Image (cartoon, grey):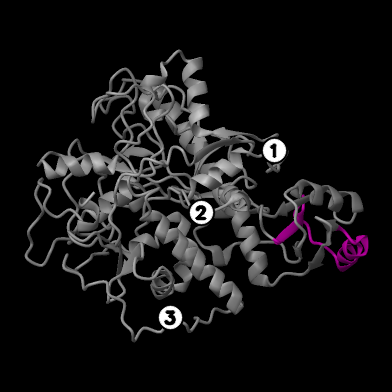
Amino acid sequence: MSDADAKPQVADEEMKVDVAADVAPDAQSDAVDLDTLPAIEGKSEAEVEALLAKAAKQVAFYFSDSNLPTDKFFFSLTVCNPDGWVPLKTILTFKRMREFGAYGEPFVLLAVRRLARAEGSDPLVVASDDGLNVRRKRSLKPNATAWDRSVYVKGFGEGETDANSQEQIEAYFEQFGKINAVRRRRGDLEGKGDKGKGKGAFKGSVFAEFEKEEEAEAFLARDSIPKFGDDDMVFMSKDAYVKMKAKEKGIPESQINRGAATSAGTSAPAAGTAAGAGEHGKKGGAPKKFNAFREMDRLKKGLDAQLAKIPDGVAVVGTPRDVKGGGVKRGRDDDDEGGDRKSARTKEPEPFEIDFNGAKVLVDPIEGRVVDPAALPFPAGAVLKFTAPGESSDWKALKTAITECGAIGVPFLQFPPGTKEGKVAKGDSSAITDAELAQLDAAKLTYGGEGVAFARPTEDEERAFWLTRANWRGEQAVKARSADASARSDKRGGDHRGGRGGRGGRGGRGGRGGRGGRGGNRDRGSRDGKKEGGSGEGLPPAVGKA
């Protein structure tokens, strides 16, 4: 859920939006068929239903109380027009939505409309009649209970691995109740000062926000919780954790900012942030986190708001508001809520090659994703799929059982927590023979007391497995290149005219246009060509009522 997500990628440099701010009303047409499922090759009806539900859930998260008030980039998209519309094609460029790109905008539109119908007379998100845009319908108001509904949990393994992704951690929490958001906690980047706070490696701990306070209380009442991996699990309320850290740092509890007065679903500043810091500056610490309610108040008073710069080429409805202090564009991290801010550069970064399965694979320079998935080389017959219907959270036990049966040595497992299906490959990625498959079947392995069944996957399933691994390798390569570039930039110091990072800025992944690219011509105003001023006019009504 918390995704916090990558800034849009611009595939077409001439991408423009010529719709006016007065998009058609969002009343759902009775003529729209919401019951006939689209046919997707290789997918059963149940799998299509699951994909629709997943797409709708992710879109709803972007507009939710847990994300919108603290998501600077997405909130800035909603204030480009008076009604809060955001183009579906822009949402489909976000990292957590790209898996639905192959199915097209109509697929996601159907997902949103089905969810709106299920929610009855008060849906959170609705679509425009032309099906091009979506917006939040419910009024956005501060929520003072998010702090009490949030818990701290540690035990997910430090650093970025293919076994502790955002989705895998979210799946782990589903056994405890409905979760609004899971926010991965990160360390600081050394030598980066305030700009590096919360931008470092994953600490192996999260803040999870339950939908209901009673579910959070039930979770905290447990004596123990199942392991996610090898590490022991540590859990407590968010309040207890922040107080503990404040005490360690000698900070009075009265100075802990719980964010209750001004934000909905906002995660408060880190323990030790003193109350009373300036709205857009510092007072003995890092700048305050983005708060949509604070910025709305400033807009209503005719003051400059601290909004994100929308890159050229990113589709919007209406006109992006002017951003003061310029040049910095907001990026959205892959799988958490945070976002890097990268200074404008003078040259777009080029795709680069990584070694994967003995071949050179071209990956994009921003996130490390494979540029041409269809051309990804992979060894045929080197993957098996399996079903493990038993109830258990100890996937390591299954890995050990496969290893001990001696069929394929020490395997690599792709088996997200909370799922019943997975894939397995040899550690050296070599082909799995029919004899080895038969040996696995003969071992009659169990998981959670139920039998595990192995089978050969389809070619598309094989490709998806290797693509996931290649994308992860690419992400690690991007991070390594970014760290090297930052180290070189810091070493150069002030020897160049461009400041600490020389003419091109400090380096990093952003490139001149950030993740959104610089794109083509900008043509995003309303039909009369007028731009919105700095006043509160033009605030989305559903947001501005807060």
Question: Magenta region: which residues?
Answer: 420-445
Q: Amino acid at mark 3?
A: Leu
Q: Nearer the viewer, residue 370 or 18?
A: 18
Q: Nearer the viewer, mark 2 or mark 3?
A: 3
Q: What is the secondary structure assignment of the residue under circle 1?
A: loop
Mark 1 against mark 3, which lies toward the viewer? 1
Q: Earlier in the sequence, mark 1 or mark 3?
A: 3
Q: Is residue 428 magenta?
A: yes
Q: Are the residues flagged by discs 1 and 3 in contact, CB closer than 8 Å? A: no
In the image, residue 541 lies at what x, y percent? 20, 57
**Label 2, label 3: how many angstroms apart (C-alpha)?**
33 Å
Q: Quadrant for residue 373, please give it.
A: bottom right
Q: Residue at horizontal 34%, vertical 49%?
A: 68
Q: In x, y percent, where is residue 360?
A: 59, 53
Q: Residue beneath label 2, please?
A: 369
User: Which dot marks residue 224?
Assistant: 1
Q: Amino acid at mark 2?
A: Arg
Q: Amino acid at mark 1?
A: Ser
Q: Is residue 25 above or below residue 383?
A: below
Q: Which residue is mark 3?
A: 34
Q: Indicate the position of residue 265 as horizontal and vertical percent values.
A: 39, 44
